[in-house]
Image: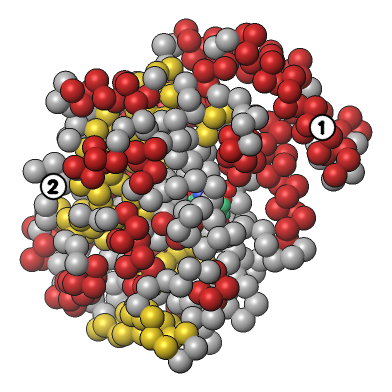
Amino acid sequence: MTVTIVGSQLGDEGKGGVVDLFGDAADVVARYQGGDNAGHTVVQGGEEYKLSLVPSGAVRGKVGVLGNGCVVNPRTLFEELDTLRERGLDPDVRVAERAHVILPYHRVLDQLEEDVKSDDDLAAGTTGRGIGPTYEDKAGRRGVRVGDLLDAETLRDRLEYVVPQKRALLEEVYDIPIEDHDEVDPDAFDIEVLYDQYREFGRRLEAEDMTVNCGAFLADRLEADERLMFEGAQGTAIDIDHGVYPYVTSSNPTAGGAAVGTGLGPSVVGDGEVIGIVKAYLSRVGTGPLPTELGAVDGQTPEDGGRPGGADLAEYIRDEGGEYGTVTGRPRRVGWLDIPMLRHAARTSGFTGLAVNHVDVLAGLDEVKVGHSYTLDGEKLLTMPPTTERWADCEANFRTFEGWPDVDWETVAEEGYDAVPENARAYLEYIEAELDTPVYAVGVGPDRSATVVRESPWE
Ligand code: GDP
Ligand code: IMO
Ligand code: MG
């Protein structure tokens, strides 16, 4: 059986924590898209692990897989593995030979294009990890795959084809003299240097027996009646197809990505459960419109974004929720829950269950609002319009819920759902009804023990 974990908003919904919680009963945890742009937090008995590439199941000793849909920076991967090993864990991570490799020039190009785009307000505020340029090369059929690192001749051929193109891009399009520029490391554009470094990564992957034919590997595990968890990164509203293009990431976090990005069929994913992870409010790192945004964050919120008088509340929630990017440390933008966004997410991925996190963060407020619908050109909308420009024109129509008190959330988690304050339950039940999907778990704190579990997706 499979359980797929999908971010239903803009990333950072607390997916890592839910993978940790429900992944305990899994044998394998596989990522199916994205790369080290992700920052997934697992808190276990007060110990915090922030994972970018290593699947969150590693903290509990599950086999981790980076599927073919991922983009893998081997340097980050080995650094992360080494750090986890120093902390006493023994992660077992396999990497799909079909996954694409992030090379140093991808990071340089990511940053350069963001700088250029920012003149036209088109920058997505990327994590700068080279994610977009690597997926571009994948689609352009000039990428380097993990399997190529294992084969000296193929690696050399790939680099000899692609590196001169990247050099020309820098020197002729961006007018940057590679060998004589303060901010560009010439090694990132040097075939010999890249060959030596990446061939070495290939040797290490081989020596540690880390590479797999992902689909076949996972199919064998299923055949042996093992339980597979698919760990989505990012979220639906930053999905390249279903999100707020162009302020998106370059992959498909939605559940369809779990099939394409692992090499198993959609029926396998659809036969299992698909859990939408919901943050009880919105947070956003990066740019683009956000109709329910509270305060504005410089450099990220578009002009006239945010709500009048919302800045204090945004700051309060940001501080209570620790809303600073896991990867970049940037303050996250904050808004009320956006129900049209969630309806869109539930449809796109076919959620069978929900986990609603950060219910504790909103505790103590007099009232809590949600954007229930939008008004666009005088018409009421219940879901997101297909273009980002139209979304920017949407006015959110709010519903107000009475606030709930701050309580001892660890005790609530122990006692179960009935111990959740009544007004918080009303809020959760409203979400359930609007999405026509049951809430399986309620996050009331960062630690795994601070989760109210109503139902296990495996049963
Ligand atoms: P992910 O990218 O979806 O895995 O989420 P992140 O790890 O980037 O961000 C979620 C943050 O919220 C982390 O610091 C988590 O430890 C924390 N967190 C997760 N669930 C809860 C919750 O229910 N309550 C609170 N207060 N924090 C939570
Ligand atoms: P997790 O898995 C939140 C955002 C970036 C930017 C856009 C494109 O922790 O939820 P990219 O570097 O992917 O090309 O950036 O997507 N972004 C995320 N926002 N959580 C994430 O991951 C994100 N990964 C990318 O801020 O707006
Ligand atoms: Mg995150």
Residue in the image at 45% along x and 58% along y: 242
Q: Mark 1 is on which residue type?
A: Arg
Residue 218 sits above or below residue 332 on the image? above
Instruction: Using the image as rendered, state which of residue 355 and residue 81 is in the foreground.
Output: 355
Badge 2 marks a residue whose secondary structure is loop
Residue in the image at 85% along x and 44% along y: 173
Q: Position of residue 66 (x, y in %)?
A: 41, 30
Q: In which quarter of the image is the N terminus?
A: top left
**Quadrant of the rendered structure where residue 321 is?**
bottom left
| In the image: residue 255, left or right of residue 177 | left
Residue in the image at 14% along x and 25% along y: 225
Residue in the image at 84% along x and 34% along y: 168
Badge 1 marks a residue whose secondary structure is helix
Residue 223 sits above or below residue 369 on the image? above
Q: In which quarter of the image is the C terminus?
A: top left
Q: Mark 1 points at which residue?
A: 167
Q: Name the residue under label 2.
A: 456
| In the image: residue 422, left or right of residue 321 | left
Residue 33 sits above or below residue 345 on the image? above
